[in-house]
């Protein structure tokens, strides 16, 4: 496909590679990530780009790849908008495609700049590709509140590059993967293979993979001391009944109320909006009775519930009850556009959907952890665990840093789809980055216990009603990633991406590579 412009074959190849990139994040049969497929599919794109004569043609290929990749990654948004939101199917499908196409513009820009700035020197071009791809991922993950779901680095929770997570985080892994993918693509070029600098880069890449596979950099941190026995509740309340007063609401109040009171564990966790009513809508004395059941003894609870009222505003929140302690509260900070807050100029769109409690107020970025049984438990709600740079701010004070993350989610909006294992991989990456366990209580799955090495130690079957009981041990050390991201955020990575963009703007390639 040595083509001067992105004709049909090249466009088809880019789209197919994009679909494979989506499948690499969580293979549909089992949900496992496939790190090698992520490298291979991105390598196909890099090979297509280096055969283009014009930057504009490269941009079209980059956009095609990314649109296919992102559509294949979060196609399940269609279910939330059409099945549960009531939006007409054509409009819901168009909304998913428009979102994917818009976010794909970042990758089109990266492809344009790479084709414009490539020097024909393979080792340098691979580094340039990594920096620009990193910039595209950062743009997608931060602009307009960010939507980084399905970043390429999440395909590597089970691969050799997982050893890099405590050092450079998921975005850093994404950049390293892009570098390796571009080196892989250049294997097809005789002129590249003949360059000494390229051979050195390939050897460096192979050495990096070998070292990471041995996990020589992932030293076992000291434990926090003592174990916490937890009970994670999965109510499996159907989403189309969850807010219905005649079905889902009484079921939730009865089931979660009973198991919060009866579960035999030091900590009981109920998922996001497990109690689907605002406090003034609850039966008289319901919340007080729950609180009283944890006023004495050796048990505590974290409970997902909306707080506030329709007049003053409401929050997507967590309440914590523990003996001898004031009621703990956490309010979700990073809200989901359209589902939890309405972006400017889009009220007309949200009015077309039936989404209850759709305009929450935000909590602060950094909020205190829930102290219990010698652990500091840091809640995050639903897709807040996508934003490792925000979770990282909680590590600025090592003495108060979390020892355990607690994710409380309701993925029932997206049905029995690949969204469930995708979200599990995201939580696993956070555990790897900070070497902190993540316990997950969800409505329909994946309710799981993840240890501080990102391994799933226990998990409930999805779409079942049950209680997952197990033990978790916290972490106390600070990983290199936790140290720098807590102080600098993503600034070091932004600098690398900006340097790559600057380098691309100063160079031109005379023609396509053989």
Image: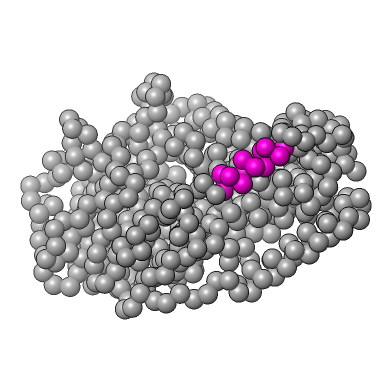
Principal secondary structure, stretch drawn in magenta: helix
State yes or no: residue 502 in magenta. yes
| Residue 385 visible to the viewer | no
- Residue 25 vs 280, above or below: the answer is below
- The residue depicted at 45 percent of the width and 60 percent of the height is 483
Image coloring type: one colour
Q: Residue 142 in the image: state x and y as whole percent.
A: 49, 40
- Residue 90 vs 458, above or below: the answer is above
Q: Nearer the viewer, residue 300 or 367?
A: 367
Q: Residue 138 in the image: state x and y as whole percent.
A: 55, 43
- The residue depicted at 20 percent of the width and 65 percent of the height is 300
- In the figure, residue 120 lies in which quadrant? top right
- Residue 174 vs 402, above or below: the answer is above
- Residue 117 vs 28, above or below: the answer is above
- In the figure, residue 69 lies in which quadrant? top right
- The residue depicted at 47 percent of the width and 54 percent of the height is 485
Q: Which residues are magenta?
A: 493-504
Q: Residue 481 in the image: state x and y as whole percent.
A: 50, 59
- The residue depicted at 13 percent of the width and 41 percent of the height is 280
Q: Nearer the viewer, residue 211 or 159?
A: 211
């Amino acid at each position: 496909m040595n083509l001067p412009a992105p004709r049909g074959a090249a466009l088809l190849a880019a789209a197919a590679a994009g679909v494979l990139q989506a499948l690499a994040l969580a293979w549909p049969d089992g949900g496992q990530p496939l790190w090698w497929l992520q490298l291979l599919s991105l390598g196909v794109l890099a090979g297509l780009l280096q055969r283009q004569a014009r930057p504009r043609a490269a941009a079209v290929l980059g956009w095609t790849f990314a649109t296919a990749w992102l559509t294949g990654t979060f196609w399940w948004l269609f279910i939330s908008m059409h099945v549960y939101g009531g939006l007409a199917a054509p409009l819901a499908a168009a909304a998913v495609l428009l979102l994917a196409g818009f976010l794909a513009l970042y990758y089109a820009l990266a492809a344009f700049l790479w084709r414009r700035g490539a020097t024909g020197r393979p080792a340098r071009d691979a580094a340039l590709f990594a920096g620009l791809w990193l910039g595209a991922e950062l743009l997608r993950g931060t602009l307009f509140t960010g939507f980084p779901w399905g970043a390429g680095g999440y395909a590597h929770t089970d691969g050799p590059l997982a050893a890099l997570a405590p050092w450079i985080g998921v975005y850093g892994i994404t950049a390293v993967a892009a570098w390796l993918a571009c080196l892989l693509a250049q294997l097809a070029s005789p002129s590249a293979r003949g360059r000494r600098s390229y051979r050195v880069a390939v050897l460096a890449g192979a050495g990096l993979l070998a070292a990471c596979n041995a996990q020589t950099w992932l030293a076992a941190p000291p434990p926090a001391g003592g174990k916490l026995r937890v009970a994670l509740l999965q109510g499996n309340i159907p989403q189309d009944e969850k807010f219905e007063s005649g079905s889902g609401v009484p079921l939730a109040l009865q089931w979660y109320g009973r198991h919060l009171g009866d579960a035999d564990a030091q900590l009981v966790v109920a998922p996001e909006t497990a109690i689907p009513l605002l406090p003034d809508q609850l039966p008289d004395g319901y919340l007080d009775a729950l609180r009283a059941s944890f006023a004495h003894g050796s048990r505590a609870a974290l409970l997902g519930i909306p707080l506030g009222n329709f007049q003053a505003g409401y929050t997507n929140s967590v309440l914590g009850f523990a003996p001898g302690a004031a009621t703990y509260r956490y309010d979700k900070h990073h809200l989901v556009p359209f589902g939890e807050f309405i972006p400017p100029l889009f009220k007309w769109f949200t009015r077309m959907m039936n989404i209850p409690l759709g305009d929450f107020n935000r909590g602060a970025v950094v909020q205190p952890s829930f102290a219990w049984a010698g652990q500091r438990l840091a809640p995050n709600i639903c897709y807040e665990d996508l934003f490792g740079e925000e979770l990282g701010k909680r590590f600025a004070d090592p003495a108060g840093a979390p020892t355990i993350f607690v994710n409380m989610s309701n993925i029932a909006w997206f049905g029995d789809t690949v969204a469930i294992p995708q979200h599990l991989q995201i939580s696993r990456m956070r555990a790897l980055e900070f070497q902190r366990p993540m316990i997950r209580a969800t409505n329909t799955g994946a309710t799981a216990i993840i240890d501080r090495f990102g391994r799933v130690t226990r998990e409930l079957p999805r779409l079942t009603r049950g209680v997952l009981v197990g033990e978790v041990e916290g972490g106390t050390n600070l990983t290199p990633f936790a140290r720098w991201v807590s102080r600098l955020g993503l600034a070091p990575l932004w600098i690398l991406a900006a340097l790559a963009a600057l380098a691309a703007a100063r160079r031109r390639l005379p023609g396509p590579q053989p």
